[in-house]
Amino acid sequence: MEVLERIDELRKQRGWSVNNLAMEAMLTQSTLNNLYVRRAEPKLSTLRAICTAFGITLAEFFRYEERSDDETGELLRRVETLSPEQKRALLLFLRASSKTS
């Protein structure tokens, strides 16, 4: 999967338009539009801003391709769409679950 396809996937999972992503990432809409028009890969600084807006790290952004066909990949994709509060709640649940095993 290419970088722009991955950005689109994450954006659509959240129901965001390109304008929403630009606002959340604190980028200009023209910056993102230029990426799509030129089908260019974003600069590292732009990709970092986009990942921050999505609430993920660069490693998480690229880890998707490594795990795209198994249950772990599905789990990672679903976790990426959670809000920070939902992620904290899930982490607490997982920690509590591992204590009872």
Image: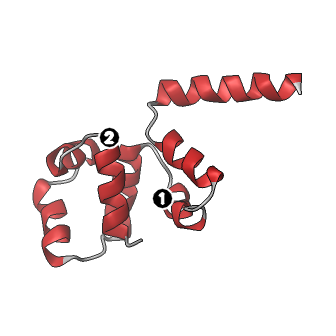
Location of the C terminus by quadrant is top right
Q: Is residue 11 left or right of residue 64?
A: left
Query: For the residue marked with disc 2, what is the amino acid?
Result: Arg
Amino acid residing under circle 1 = Phe
Which residue: 50% across, 48% down?
A: 77
> Could you say which quadrant of the image residue 5 lies in?
bottom left
Residue 58 image position (x, y, % from top left)? 49, 59
Seen in the picture, residue 61 relative to 42 is either above or below; the reply is above
Q: Position of residue 79 (x, y in %)?
A: 53, 40
Q: x%, y% of residue 43? A: 32, 71
User: For this rendering, which residue is in front, 100 or 59?
Assistant: 100
| Residue at point 59%, 67% (across, down) | 66
Question: Would residue 89 be found to the left or right of residue 96 on screen?
Answer: left
Q: Which mark is residue 100?
A: none
Mark-to-mark CA distance, 1 and 2: 15 Å
Determine crowd level at label 1: few under 14, some 14-19, many 20+ residues with C-alpha closer than 10 A.
many
State the residue position of label 1. 61
| Secondary structure of the residue carrying numbered label 2 | loop
Observer-nearest residue: 80 or 25? 80
Look at 60% across and 61% down and name the residue there.
67
Across and down, in percent, residue 10 comes to: 36, 51
Q: Which residue position holds label 2?
A: 14
Left or right for 87, reference 98: left
